[in-house]
Image: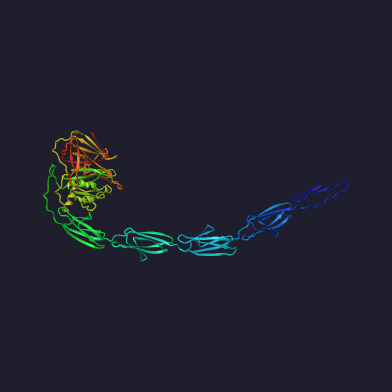
Protein backbone atom coordinates (compact mmCIF):
# COMPACT_ATOMS: atom_id res chain seq x y z
CA UNK A 1 0.00 0.00 0.00
CA UNK A 2 1.54 3.49 -1.07
CA UNK A 3 0.02 6.82 0.06
CA UNK A 4 1.41 9.84 -1.74
CA UNK A 5 0.54 13.60 -1.76
CA UNK A 6 2.41 16.57 -3.24
CA UNK A 7 4.58 18.28 -0.64
CA UNK A 8 4.39 15.32 1.75
CA UNK A 9 6.46 12.28 2.45
CA UNK A 10 5.24 9.09 0.73
CA UNK A 11 4.05 6.22 3.05
CA UNK A 12 4.41 2.59 2.09
CA UNK A 13 2.90 -0.33 4.08
CA UNK A 14 2.43 -4.04 3.44
CA UNK A 15 -0.79 -5.52 4.90
CA UNK A 16 -2.49 -8.93 5.05
CA UNK A 17 -6.24 -9.02 4.58
CA UNK A 18 -8.65 -11.97 5.05
CA UNK A 19 -12.07 -12.60 3.67
CA UNK A 20 -14.80 -11.26 5.91
CA UNK A 21 -12.35 -9.24 8.01
CA UNK A 22 -12.52 -5.56 6.92
CA UNK A 23 -9.27 -3.58 7.46
CA UNK A 24 -9.21 0.14 8.23
CA UNK A 25 -5.96 2.09 7.52
CA UNK A 26 -5.53 5.77 8.49
CA UNK A 27 -2.33 7.70 7.67
CA UNK A 28 -1.06 11.13 8.65
CA UNK A 29 1.37 12.25 5.98
CA UNK A 30 4.32 14.37 7.08
CA UNK A 31 4.73 17.62 5.10
CA UNK A 32 7.98 18.19 3.27
CA UNK A 33 10.01 21.31 4.37
CA UNK A 34 9.92 24.48 2.13
CA UNK A 35 12.91 26.56 0.90
CA UNK A 36 13.05 30.36 1.06
CA UNK A 37 15.72 32.26 -0.88
CA UNK A 38 16.08 36.07 -0.22
CA UNK A 39 18.47 38.42 -2.11
CA UNK A 40 19.10 42.22 -2.15
CA UNK A 41 20.83 44.23 -4.92
CA UNK A 42 21.65 46.91 -2.38
CA UNK A 43 22.99 44.65 0.35
CA UNK A 44 21.79 45.12 3.93
CA UNK A 45 20.92 42.70 6.73
CA UNK A 46 18.22 40.11 6.03
CA UNK A 47 15.81 39.04 8.77
CA UNK A 48 13.57 35.93 8.90
CA UNK A 49 10.66 35.96 11.34
CA UNK A 50 12.44 38.73 13.31
CA UNK A 51 15.80 37.05 13.45
CA UNK A 52 18.83 38.38 11.54
CA UNK A 53 20.05 35.55 9.40
CA UNK A 54 22.35 36.96 6.70
CA UNK A 55 23.95 39.97 4.94
CA UNK A 56 22.66 40.68 1.51
CA UNK A 57 20.19 37.73 1.72
CA UNK A 58 19.92 34.04 2.64
CA UNK A 59 18.73 30.61 1.50
CA UNK A 60 16.98 28.57 4.22
CA UNK A 61 14.90 25.40 4.60
CA UNK A 62 11.79 26.33 6.52
CA UNK A 63 8.56 24.78 7.59
CA UNK A 64 5.60 25.31 5.36
CA UNK A 65 3.45 28.23 6.43
CA UNK A 66 3.76 32.02 6.70
CA UNK A 67 7.18 33.62 7.22
CA UNK A 68 8.14 37.27 7.69
CA UNK A 69 11.10 38.60 5.65
CA UNK A 70 12.82 41.94 6.27
CA UNK A 71 15.96 43.59 4.75
CA UNK A 72 17.50 46.56 6.53
CA UNK A 73 20.26 48.93 5.38
CA UNK A 74 21.19 52.38 6.56
CA UNK A 75 20.10 55.15 4.15
CA UNK A 76 17.40 52.97 2.64
CA UNK A 77 13.80 52.36 3.50
CA UNK A 78 13.32 48.96 5.27
CA UNK A 79 12.05 46.24 2.97
CA UNK A 80 9.44 43.85 4.51
CA UNK A 81 7.15 41.13 3.17
CA UNK A 82 5.18 38.06 4.46
CA UNK A 83 5.59 34.88 2.45
CA UNK A 84 3.20 31.87 2.56
CA UNK A 85 5.06 28.70 1.67
CA UNK A 86 3.36 25.44 0.77
CA UNK A 87 5.00 22.14 1.79
CA UNK A 88 8.01 21.48 -0.46
CA UNK A 89 7.70 24.85 -2.18
CA UNK A 90 10.76 26.88 -3.19
CA UNK A 91 10.29 30.69 -3.25
CA UNK A 92 12.76 33.43 -4.24
CA UNK A 93 12.31 36.94 -2.89
CA UNK A 94 14.32 39.83 -4.38
CA UNK A 95 14.39 42.85 -2.09
CA UNK A 96 14.71 46.15 -3.95
CA UNK A 97 15.79 48.74 -1.40
CA UNK A 98 14.63 52.28 -2.03
CA UNK A 99 17.15 54.95 -1.00
CA UNK A 100 16.02 57.21 1.80
CA UNK A 101 17.10 60.62 0.28
CA UNK A 102 18.60 63.63 1.99
CA UNK A 103 17.96 67.26 0.88
CA UNK A 104 20.56 69.91 -0.03
CA UNK A 105 19.27 73.46 -0.72
CA UNK A 106 21.82 75.46 -2.77
CA UNK A 107 21.57 79.25 -3.29
CA UNK A 108 24.04 81.82 -4.58
CA UNK A 109 24.71 85.49 -5.24
CA UNK A 110 24.36 86.12 -8.11
CA UNK A 111 21.52 83.72 -8.68
CA UNK A 112 21.02 81.62 -11.80
CA UNK A 113 24.51 80.17 -11.36
CA UNK A 114 24.99 76.62 -12.62
CA UNK A 115 25.11 73.79 -10.03
CA UNK A 116 26.97 70.52 -10.50
CA UNK A 117 26.50 67.50 -8.21
CA UNK A 118 29.41 65.08 -8.25
CA UNK A 119 30.49 66.46 -11.61
CA UNK A 120 27.08 66.35 -13.28
CA UNK A 121 24.67 69.12 -14.21
CA UNK A 122 22.12 69.64 -11.46
CA UNK A 123 20.38 72.91 -12.43
CA UNK A 124 20.69 76.58 -11.51
CA UNK A 125 20.54 78.37 -8.19
CA UNK A 126 18.40 78.42 -6.19
CA UNK A 127 18.22 74.63 -6.51
CA UNK A 128 17.01 71.76 -4.25
CA UNK A 129 19.02 68.55 -4.57
CA UNK A 130 17.75 65.19 -3.32
CA UNK A 131 20.64 62.87 -2.66
CA UNK A 132 21.53 59.68 -0.86
CA UNK A 133 23.11 60.05 2.48
CA UNK A 134 26.86 60.24 2.43
CA UNK A 135 29.53 62.43 0.85
CA UNK A 136 28.84 64.64 -2.18
CA UNK A 137 30.75 67.29 -4.13
CA UNK A 138 28.89 70.53 -4.92
CA UNK A 139 30.24 72.94 -7.61
CA UNK A 140 28.73 76.37 -8.31
CA UNK A 141 29.81 78.25 -11.46
CA UNK A 142 28.94 81.40 -13.40
CA UNK A 143 30.79 83.01 -16.31
CA UNK A 144 32.93 85.86 -15.10
CA UNK A 145 33.10 84.56 -11.51
CA UNK A 146 35.45 82.27 -9.63
CA UNK A 147 34.12 78.71 -9.44
CA UNK A 148 33.35 77.39 -5.94
CA UNK A 149 33.64 73.67 -5.08
CA UNK A 150 32.73 72.08 -1.71
CA UNK A 151 32.52 68.50 -0.40
CA UNK A 152 29.65 67.90 2.08
CA UNK A 153 28.37 64.98 4.17
CA UNK A 154 24.60 64.60 4.39
CA UNK A 155 22.46 62.34 6.51
CA UNK A 156 18.97 61.12 5.98
CA UNK A 157 16.40 63.41 7.52
CA UNK A 158 18.88 66.25 8.05
CA UNK A 159 18.36 68.91 5.31
CA UNK A 160 21.49 70.88 4.43
CA UNK A 161 21.43 74.55 3.35
CA UNK A 162 24.35 75.86 1.28
CA UNK A 163 24.59 79.58 0.39
CA UNK A 164 27.46 80.92 -1.72
CA UNK A 165 28.61 84.40 -2.69
CA UNK A 166 30.62 84.14 -5.90
CA UNK A 167 33.64 86.38 -6.36
CA UNK A 168 33.64 88.25 -9.72
CA UNK A 169 36.66 87.82 -11.98
CA UNK A 170 38.41 91.04 -13.04
CA UNK A 171 37.61 92.47 -16.49
CA UNK A 172 40.13 93.67 -19.09
CA UNK A 173 39.75 96.94 -20.95
CA UNK A 174 41.89 97.58 -24.04
CA UNK A 175 41.81 101.08 -25.57
CA UNK A 176 43.61 102.09 -28.77
CA UNK A 177 43.68 105.22 -30.92
CA UNK A 178 44.74 105.42 -34.56
CA UNK A 179 45.53 109.09 -34.08
CA UNK A 180 47.50 108.81 -30.84
CA UNK A 181 46.73 111.16 -27.95
CA UNK A 182 46.56 110.68 -24.18
CA UNK A 183 44.14 108.04 -22.88
CA UNK A 184 42.29 108.52 -19.58
CA UNK A 185 40.53 105.93 -17.43
CA UNK A 186 37.99 107.20 -14.91
CA UNK A 187 39.57 110.65 -15.04
CA UNK A 188 43.18 109.46 -14.63
CA UNK A 189 45.73 109.63 -17.45
CA UNK A 190 47.04 106.10 -17.99
CA UNK A 191 48.74 105.90 -21.39
CA UNK A 192 49.67 107.51 -24.69
CA UNK A 193 47.86 106.12 -27.71
CA UNK A 194 45.85 103.69 -25.55
CA UNK A 195 46.24 101.14 -22.76
CA UNK A 196 45.40 97.60 -21.66
CA UNK A 197 44.28 97.32 -18.04
CA UNK A 198 42.71 94.80 -15.66
CA UNK A 199 39.72 96.53 -14.06
CA UNK A 200 36.86 95.67 -11.74
CA UNK A 201 33.54 94.83 -13.39
CA UNK A 202 31.19 97.78 -13.70
CA UNK A 203 31.06 101.11 -15.54
CA UNK A 204 34.28 102.85 -16.54
CA UNK A 205 34.81 106.20 -18.26
CA UNK A 206 37.27 106.30 -21.16
CA UNK A 207 38.60 109.47 -22.73
CA UNK A 208 41.23 110.11 -25.41
CA UNK A 209 42.57 113.63 -25.84
CA UNK A 210 44.81 115.04 -28.57
CA UNK A 211 45.36 118.59 -29.69
CA UNK A 212 43.61 119.43 -32.94
CA UNK A 213 41.03 116.69 -32.50
CA UNK A 214 37.69 116.50 -30.77
CA UNK A 215 37.92 114.71 -27.43
CA UNK A 216 36.74 111.12 -27.61
CA UNK A 217 34.72 109.93 -24.62
CA UNK A 218 32.66 106.84 -23.86
CA UNK A 219 31.34 104.95 -20.84
CA UNK A 220 31.92 101.23 -20.92
CA UNK A 221 29.98 98.69 -18.83
CA UNK A 222 32.08 95.57 -18.28
CA UNK A 223 30.70 92.27 -17.06
CA UNK A 224 32.86 90.10 -14.76
CA UNK A 225 35.63 88.41 -16.74
CA UNK A 226 34.76 90.32 -19.93
CA UNK A 227 37.43 91.59 -22.31
CA UNK A 228 36.44 94.70 -24.25
CA UNK A 229 38.38 96.52 -26.94
CA UNK A 230 37.61 100.19 -27.56
CA UNK A 231 39.01 101.82 -30.70
CA UNK A 232 38.95 105.58 -30.38
CA UNK A 233 38.56 107.25 -33.76
CA UNK A 234 39.51 110.85 -33.20
CA UNK A 235 37.73 113.34 -35.42
CA UNK A 236 39.86 116.29 -36.51
CA UNK A 237 38.73 119.60 -35.12
CA UNK A 238 38.57 121.39 -38.43
CA UNK A 239 39.56 124.91 -39.21
CA UNK A 240 37.73 127.02 -41.78
CA UNK A 241 39.30 128.95 -44.64
CA UNK A 242 36.93 131.23 -46.54
CA UNK A 243 38.29 132.07 -49.99
CA UNK A 244 36.82 134.87 -52.09
CA UNK A 245 38.22 136.52 -55.17
CA UNK A 246 37.87 139.30 -57.67
CA UNK A 247 36.77 138.20 -60.19
CA UNK A 248 34.61 135.51 -58.60
CA UNK A 249 34.04 132.01 -59.98
CA UNK A 250 37.80 131.49 -60.01
CA UNK A 251 38.98 127.91 -59.45
CA UNK A 252 40.32 127.03 -56.00
CA UNK A 253 42.88 124.31 -55.30
CA UNK A 254 43.70 123.03 -51.84
CA UNK A 255 47.08 121.33 -51.58
CA UNK A 256 47.04 120.69 -55.32
CA UNK A 257 43.50 119.30 -55.52
CA UNK A 258 40.26 120.70 -56.90
CA UNK A 259 38.35 122.50 -54.13
CA UNK A 260 35.65 124.41 -56.03
CA UNK A 261 35.12 127.96 -57.20
CA UNK A 262 35.18 131.27 -55.35
CA UNK A 263 33.57 132.17 -53.07
CA UNK A 264 34.41 128.84 -51.41
CA UNK A 265 34.53 127.62 -47.79
CA UNK A 266 37.25 125.07 -47.08
CA UNK A 267 37.17 122.90 -43.98
CA UNK A 268 40.66 121.65 -43.21
CA UNK A 269 42.71 120.05 -40.46
CA UNK A 270 44.99 122.21 -38.38
CA UNK A 271 48.41 122.83 -39.87
CA UNK A 272 49.77 124.42 -43.04
CA UNK A 273 47.86 124.29 -46.33
CA UNK A 274 48.58 125.61 -49.81
CA UNK A 275 45.75 127.58 -51.40
CA UNK A 276 45.83 128.30 -55.13
CA UNK A 277 43.34 130.55 -56.97
CA UNK A 278 43.31 130.63 -60.75
CA UNK A 279 41.27 131.98 -63.62
CA UNK A 280 42.04 132.03 -67.31
CA UNK A 281 43.57 135.35 -68.33
CA UNK A 282 44.86 136.05 -64.81
CA UNK A 283 48.08 135.25 -62.99
CA UNK A 284 48.02 132.31 -60.61
CA UNK A 285 47.69 133.27 -56.91
CA UNK A 286 49.17 130.93 -54.33
CA UNK A 287 49.75 131.17 -50.57
CA UNK A 288 50.59 128.86 -47.67
CA UNK A 289 48.16 129.31 -44.80
CA UNK A 290 48.64 127.95 -41.27
CA UNK A 291 45.49 127.39 -39.20
CA UNK A 292 44.79 126.22 -35.67
CA UNK A 293 41.98 123.84 -34.67
CA UNK A 294 38.66 125.67 -34.76
CA UNK A 295 40.19 128.77 -36.33
CA UNK A 296 38.52 130.66 -39.19
CA UNK A 297 40.66 132.45 -41.79
CA UNK A 298 39.31 134.73 -44.49
CA UNK A 299 41.30 135.06 -47.72
CA UNK A 300 40.30 137.86 -50.09
CA UNK A 301 42.17 137.49 -53.36
CA UNK A 302 42.42 140.02 -56.16
CA UNK A 303 43.76 138.33 -59.27
CA UNK A 304 46.10 140.26 -61.57
CA UNK A 305 45.39 140.15 -65.28
CA UNK A 306 47.97 138.60 -67.55
CA UNK A 307 49.18 140.51 -70.54
CA UNK A 308 46.69 139.73 -73.30
CA UNK A 309 47.95 137.59 -76.12
CA UNK A 310 46.63 137.99 -79.61
CA UNK A 311 44.46 134.97 -80.36
CA UNK A 312 45.43 132.85 -83.32
CA UNK A 313 42.74 131.83 -85.74
CA UNK A 314 45.04 129.36 -87.51
CA UNK A 315 47.65 127.00 -86.17
CA UNK A 316 50.82 127.16 -88.26
CA UNK A 317 51.02 124.12 -90.46
CA UNK A 318 47.58 122.76 -89.54
CA UNK A 319 45.71 124.12 -92.50
CA UNK A 320 42.43 124.51 -90.60
CA UNK A 321 40.82 127.38 -88.80
CA UNK A 322 39.62 127.28 -85.18
CA UNK A 323 36.10 128.55 -84.54
CA UNK A 324 36.46 128.60 -80.75
CA UNK A 325 38.71 127.13 -78.13
CA UNK A 326 38.46 123.33 -78.28
CA UNK A 327 35.92 121.78 -75.92
CA UNK A 328 37.24 118.36 -74.86
CA UNK A 329 34.48 116.19 -73.35
CA UNK A 330 34.99 112.76 -71.77
CA UNK A 331 32.32 110.34 -73.09
CA UNK A 332 31.86 106.78 -71.90
CA UNK A 333 31.48 103.59 -73.94
CA UNK A 334 29.76 101.30 -71.42
CA UNK A 335 27.05 99.19 -73.11
CA UNK A 336 24.43 101.07 -71.04
CA UNK A 337 25.69 104.35 -72.53
CA UNK A 338 25.18 103.35 -76.17
CA UNK A 339 24.36 104.91 -78.52
CA UNK A 340 26.29 108.04 -77.51
CA UNK A 341 25.41 111.60 -78.37
CA UNK A 342 27.77 114.05 -80.09
CA UNK A 343 30.54 111.75 -81.34
CA UNK A 344 29.61 112.25 -84.99
CA UNK A 345 29.65 116.06 -84.48
CA UNK A 346 33.17 116.17 -83.02
CA UNK A 347 36.12 117.36 -85.12
CA UNK A 348 38.43 114.86 -83.40
CA UNK A 349 37.62 111.78 -81.29
CA UNK A 350 40.27 109.83 -79.38
CA UNK A 351 39.30 106.34 -78.13
CA UNK A 352 41.44 104.35 -75.66
CA UNK A 353 41.03 101.51 -73.11
CA UNK A 354 39.67 102.57 -69.70
CA UNK A 355 38.53 99.77 -67.37
CA UNK A 356 37.23 96.18 -67.44
CA UNK A 357 38.24 96.06 -71.12
CA UNK A 358 35.81 98.89 -71.97
CA UNK A 359 37.07 101.91 -73.91
CA UNK A 360 36.35 105.60 -73.36
CA UNK A 361 36.34 108.67 -75.63
CA UNK A 362 37.49 112.26 -75.45
CA UNK A 363 35.66 114.26 -78.11
CA UNK A 364 37.04 117.61 -79.30
CA UNK A 365 34.54 120.19 -80.57
CA UNK A 366 36.45 122.92 -82.46
CA UNK A 367 34.49 123.99 -85.55
CA UNK A 368 31.17 122.22 -85.08
CA UNK A 369 28.48 122.34 -82.36
CA UNK A 370 26.46 119.43 -80.96
CA UNK A 371 22.95 119.83 -79.49
CA UNK A 372 23.51 116.94 -77.04
CA UNK A 373 26.83 115.49 -75.84
CA UNK A 374 27.25 112.51 -73.52
CA UNK A 375 27.03 110.54 -71.38
CA UNK A 376 29.85 112.48 -69.67
CA UNK A 377 32.18 110.43 -67.44
CA UNK A 378 35.39 110.63 -65.46
CA UNK A 379 38.94 111.65 -66.40
CA UNK A 380 42.02 109.45 -66.69
CA UNK A 381 45.64 110.61 -66.45
CA UNK A 382 46.51 109.62 -70.01
CA UNK A 383 43.39 111.32 -71.43
CA UNK A 384 44.39 114.47 -69.52
CA UNK A 385 47.86 114.42 -71.11
CA UNK A 386 46.48 113.85 -74.62
CA UNK A 387 43.80 116.52 -74.21
CA UNK A 388 46.44 119.10 -73.20
CA UNK A 389 47.84 118.90 -76.76
CA UNK A 390 44.79 120.86 -77.99
CA UNK A 391 44.93 123.53 -75.21
CA UNK A 392 41.20 122.95 -74.65
CA UNK A 393 38.78 123.40 -71.82
CA UNK A 394 38.51 119.84 -70.55
CA UNK A 395 35.16 118.57 -69.21
CA UNK A 396 34.75 115.47 -67.07
CA UNK A 397 32.55 114.02 -64.29
CA UNK A 398 34.91 112.89 -61.55
CA UNK A 399 38.32 111.36 -62.06
CA UNK A 400 40.55 108.40 -61.34
CA UNK A 401 43.32 108.69 -58.72
CA UNK A 402 46.14 110.98 -59.87
CA UNK A 403 44.30 112.65 -62.76
CA UNK A 404 43.69 116.03 -61.01
CA UNK A 405 47.34 116.31 -59.95
CA UNK A 406 48.50 115.69 -63.53
CA UNK A 407 46.00 118.24 -64.88
CA UNK A 408 47.18 120.87 -62.41
CA UNK A 409 50.85 120.20 -63.12
CA UNK A 410 50.44 120.73 -66.87
CA UNK A 411 47.98 123.61 -66.28
CA UNK A 412 45.06 122.03 -68.14
CA UNK A 413 41.96 124.19 -67.89
CA UNK A 414 39.10 121.97 -66.84
CA UNK A 415 35.62 121.74 -65.35
CA UNK A 416 34.47 118.87 -63.15
CA UNK A 417 30.74 118.39 -63.74
CA UNK A 418 30.33 116.87 -60.28
CA UNK A 419 31.48 120.16 -58.74
CA UNK A 420 30.21 122.68 -61.28
CA UNK A 421 27.04 121.33 -62.88
CA UNK A 422 25.66 124.54 -64.41
CA UNK A 423 26.12 123.25 -67.98
CA UNK A 424 25.07 119.65 -67.27
CA UNK A 425 21.86 117.75 -66.67
CA UNK A 426 20.71 114.18 -66.08
CA UNK A 427 18.01 112.42 -68.09
CA UNK A 428 15.38 110.01 -66.80
CA UNK A 429 15.59 107.53 -69.68
CA UNK A 430 18.86 106.05 -68.39
CA UNK A 431 20.16 105.25 -64.94
CA UNK A 432 23.11 107.03 -63.35
CA UNK A 433 25.96 107.30 -64.03
CA UNK A 434 25.05 106.73 -67.69
CA UNK A 435 22.72 109.75 -67.98
CA UNK A 436 24.81 112.94 -67.60
CA UNK A 437 24.61 115.19 -70.68
CA UNK A 438 25.49 118.66 -71.91
CA UNK A 439 25.68 120.59 -75.21
CA UNK A 440 28.44 122.66 -76.78
CA UNK A 441 26.34 125.83 -76.51
CA UNK A 442 25.76 125.23 -72.78
CA UNK A 443 29.48 124.63 -72.24
CA UNK A 444 30.47 127.80 -74.09
CA UNK A 445 27.88 129.84 -72.20
CA UNK A 446 29.02 128.54 -68.81
CA UNK A 447 32.72 129.02 -69.53
CA UNK A 448 32.11 132.49 -70.90
CA UNK A 449 30.31 133.37 -67.65
CA UNK A 450 33.43 132.29 -65.72
CA UNK A 451 35.56 134.65 -67.81
CA UNK A 452 37.58 131.89 -69.41
CA UNK A 453 39.24 132.62 -72.73
CA UNK A 454 37.54 130.90 -75.67
CA UNK A 455 39.67 132.02 -78.64
CA UNK A 456 42.89 130.07 -78.15
CA UNK A 457 43.65 126.41 -78.80
CA UNK A 458 45.17 124.10 -81.39
CA UNK A 459 44.60 120.96 -83.45
CA UNK A 460 46.89 118.92 -81.25
CA UNK A 461 49.64 118.37 -83.81
CA UNK A 462 47.30 117.27 -86.61
CA UNK A 463 48.21 118.53 -90.09
CA UNK A 464 45.57 118.67 -92.80
CA UNK A 465 46.01 118.02 -96.51
CA UNK A 466 44.29 119.46 -99.56
CA UNK A 467 41.16 117.61 -100.71
CA UNK A 468 41.79 115.15 -103.56
CA UNK A 469 45.37 114.47 -102.59
CA UNK A 470 45.77 110.71 -102.31
CA UNK A 471 48.25 109.40 -99.75
CA UNK A 472 49.04 105.82 -98.80
CA UNK A 473 50.66 103.04 -100.80
CA UNK A 474 48.09 100.35 -100.03
CA UNK A 475 44.39 100.23 -100.82
CA UNK A 476 42.37 99.21 -97.74
CA UNK A 477 38.58 98.91 -97.80
CA UNK A 478 38.14 97.84 -94.17
CA UNK A 479 40.09 97.58 -90.94
CA UNK A 480 39.28 95.60 -87.80
CA UNK A 481 40.79 96.99 -84.59
CA UNK A 482 40.94 94.39 -81.81
CA UNK A 483 41.10 95.92 -78.31
CA UNK A 484 40.75 92.65 -76.38
CA UNK A 485 39.05 89.26 -76.50
CA UNK A 486 35.51 90.66 -76.71
CA UNK A 487 35.68 94.28 -77.90
CA UNK A 488 36.56 95.21 -81.46
CA UNK A 489 35.83 98.02 -83.91
CA UNK A 490 35.48 97.93 -87.70
CA UNK A 491 36.00 100.86 -90.10
CA UNK A 492 34.62 100.19 -93.58
CA UNK A 493 35.36 102.45 -96.54
CA UNK A 494 32.33 103.98 -98.29
CA UNK A 495 33.63 105.27 -101.66
CA UNK A 496 30.28 106.86 -102.56
CA UNK A 497 30.69 109.39 -99.74
CA UNK A 498 34.43 109.26 -99.28
CA UNK A 499 34.18 108.33 -95.58
CA UNK A 500 34.78 105.37 -93.25
CA UNK A 501 31.75 103.96 -91.47
CA UNK A 502 32.18 102.81 -87.86
CA UNK A 503 30.99 99.44 -86.52
CA UNK A 504 31.25 98.16 -82.94
CA UNK A 505 31.27 94.44 -82.26
CA UNK A 506 29.55 93.72 -85.57
CA UNK A 507 26.81 96.38 -85.33
CA UNK A 508 26.71 99.89 -86.81
CA UNK A 509 27.84 102.59 -84.36
CA UNK A 510 25.01 105.11 -84.20
CA UNK A 511 24.92 108.83 -83.43
CA UNK A 512 21.97 109.20 -81.04
CA UNK A 513 21.18 112.78 -82.09
CA UNK A 514 20.47 111.79 -85.69
CA UNK A 515 20.15 108.01 -85.74
CA UNK A 516 22.79 107.95 -88.50
CA UNK A 517 25.89 105.76 -88.56
CA UNK A 518 29.07 107.43 -87.31
CA UNK A 519 31.63 108.22 -90.02
CA UNK A 520 35.19 109.54 -90.24
CA UNK A 521 37.25 111.16 -93.00
CA UNK A 522 40.46 109.81 -91.46
CA UNK A 523 41.25 107.10 -88.91
CA UNK A 524 44.61 107.08 -87.10
CA UNK A 525 45.40 103.78 -85.37
CA UNK A 526 48.09 103.94 -82.68
CA UNK A 527 49.59 100.97 -80.78
CA UNK A 528 50.43 101.72 -77.12
CA UNK A 529 51.62 99.74 -74.10
CA UNK A 530 48.53 99.10 -71.92
CA UNK A 531 48.57 97.35 -68.54
CA UNK A 532 46.15 96.71 -65.69
CA UNK A 533 46.78 98.81 -62.55
CA UNK A 534 47.70 96.35 -59.79
CA UNK A 535 45.23 96.25 -56.91
CA UNK A 536 42.75 98.63 -58.57
CA UNK A 537 39.23 97.69 -57.46
CA UNK A 538 37.70 98.92 -60.72
CA UNK A 539 40.19 97.11 -62.97
CA UNK A 540 41.37 100.45 -64.36
CA UNK A 541 44.14 100.47 -66.93
CA UNK A 542 47.20 102.64 -67.48
CA UNK A 543 48.33 103.57 -70.99
CA UNK A 544 51.76 104.60 -72.27
CA UNK A 545 51.75 108.26 -73.29
CA UNK A 546 55.35 109.26 -74.00
CA UNK A 547 57.74 107.79 -76.51
CA UNK A 548 56.89 106.37 -79.90
CA UNK A 549 55.13 103.43 -81.45
CA UNK A 550 53.63 101.85 -84.51
CA UNK A 551 50.71 103.60 -86.23
CA UNK A 552 48.49 103.30 -89.30
CA UNK A 553 46.70 106.16 -91.08
CA UNK A 554 43.51 105.31 -93.00
CA UNK A 555 42.05 107.84 -95.45
CA UNK A 556 40.67 107.88 -98.98
CA UNK A 557 40.48 104.07 -98.98
CA UNK A 558 44.23 103.78 -98.47
CA UNK A 559 46.53 102.90 -95.55
CA UNK A 560 49.85 104.53 -94.69
CA UNK A 561 52.18 102.71 -92.24
CA UNK A 562 53.37 105.29 -89.73
CA UNK A 563 55.04 106.04 -86.41
CA UNK A 564 53.62 108.18 -83.62
CA UNK A 565 55.92 110.27 -81.41
CA UNK A 566 55.32 112.25 -78.22
CA UNK A 567 58.47 113.22 -76.30
CA UNK A 568 56.91 114.93 -73.25
CA UNK A 569 53.76 116.33 -71.65
CA UNK A 570 53.95 119.67 -73.45
CA UNK A 571 54.57 118.41 -76.98
CA UNK A 572 51.81 117.22 -79.32
CA UNK A 573 51.69 113.72 -80.78
CA UNK A 574 53.04 113.81 -84.34
CA UNK A 575 52.75 111.21 -87.12
CA UNK A 576 55.51 110.28 -89.58
CA UNK A 577 55.55 108.01 -92.61
CA UNK A 578 58.29 105.46 -93.33
CA UNK A 579 60.42 108.17 -95.00
CA UNK A 580 60.26 110.38 -91.89
CA UNK A 581 57.82 112.91 -93.33
CA UNK A 582 54.93 114.41 -91.35
CA UNK A 583 51.61 112.93 -92.39
CA UNK A 584 48.69 115.19 -93.23
CA UNK A 585 45.08 113.97 -92.97
CA UNK A 586 41.69 114.92 -94.39
CA UNK A 587 39.66 117.67 -92.78
CA UNK A 588 36.43 116.60 -91.16
CA UNK A 589 35.88 113.94 -88.50
CA UNK A 590 39.22 112.49 -87.46
CA UNK A 591 39.25 109.43 -85.19
CA UNK A 592 42.36 108.46 -83.24
CA UNK A 593 42.21 104.84 -82.08
CA UNK A 594 44.58 103.76 -79.29
CA UNK A 595 44.79 99.96 -79.18
CA UNK A 596 46.86 97.86 -76.73
CA UNK A 597 50.00 95.97 -77.69
CA UNK A 598 48.16 92.69 -77.05
CA UNK A 599 45.38 93.67 -79.47
CA UNK A 600 45.60 93.58 -83.23
CA UNK A 601 44.76 95.17 -86.61
CA UNK A 602 43.41 93.37 -89.66
CA UNK A 603 43.24 95.12 -93.03
CA UNK A 604 41.33 94.08 -96.13
Q: Is residue 74 visible?
A: yes
**Image coords of residue 37 (percent x, y):** 69, 53
Give the left or right position of residue 86, taking residue 311 as reference: right
**Image coords of residue 29 (percent x, y):** 79, 52
Q: How is the image coloured?
A: rainbow
Give the left or right position of residue 9, taking residue 306 as reference: right
Q: Is residue 345 visible?
A: no
Seen as rendered, the residue at the extreme bottom is 187
Residue in front for this viewpoint, 32 or 508 = 32
**Image coords of residue 409 (percent x, y):** 20, 51
Give the left or right position of residue 508, taking residue 304 as reference: right
**Image coords of residue 502 (percent x, y):** 23, 39
Q: Which quadrant of the rendered structure holds the C terminus?
A: top left
Q: Quadrant of residue 132?
A: bottom right
- Residue beneath the point at 12% across and 48% down: 311
Counting every numbered tag in the picture gives 0
Seen as rendered, the residue at the extreme left is 310
- Compared with residue 69, is residue 601 higher up or lower down, i.e. above or below? above
Residue in front for this viewpoint, 211 or 92 = 211
Amino acid sequence: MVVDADGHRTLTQTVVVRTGQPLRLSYKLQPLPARLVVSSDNGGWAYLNGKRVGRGGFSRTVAPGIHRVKVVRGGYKTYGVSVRLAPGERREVRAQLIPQLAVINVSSVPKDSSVHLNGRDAGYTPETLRVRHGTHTITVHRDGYKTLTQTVVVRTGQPLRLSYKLQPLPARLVVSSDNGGWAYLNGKRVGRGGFSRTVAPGIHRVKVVRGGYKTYGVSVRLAPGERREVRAQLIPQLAVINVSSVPKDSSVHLNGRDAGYTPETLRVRHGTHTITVHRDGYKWWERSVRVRPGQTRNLRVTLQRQKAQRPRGRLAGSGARIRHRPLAVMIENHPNARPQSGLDYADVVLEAPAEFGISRFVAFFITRDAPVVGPVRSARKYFVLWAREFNPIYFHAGYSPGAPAVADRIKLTRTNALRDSRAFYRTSDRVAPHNLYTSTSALLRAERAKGRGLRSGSWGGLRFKQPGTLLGPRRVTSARLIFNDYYYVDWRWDPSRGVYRRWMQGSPAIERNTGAQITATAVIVRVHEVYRIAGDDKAREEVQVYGSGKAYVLQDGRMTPATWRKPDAYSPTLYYDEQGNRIAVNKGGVWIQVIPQYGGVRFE
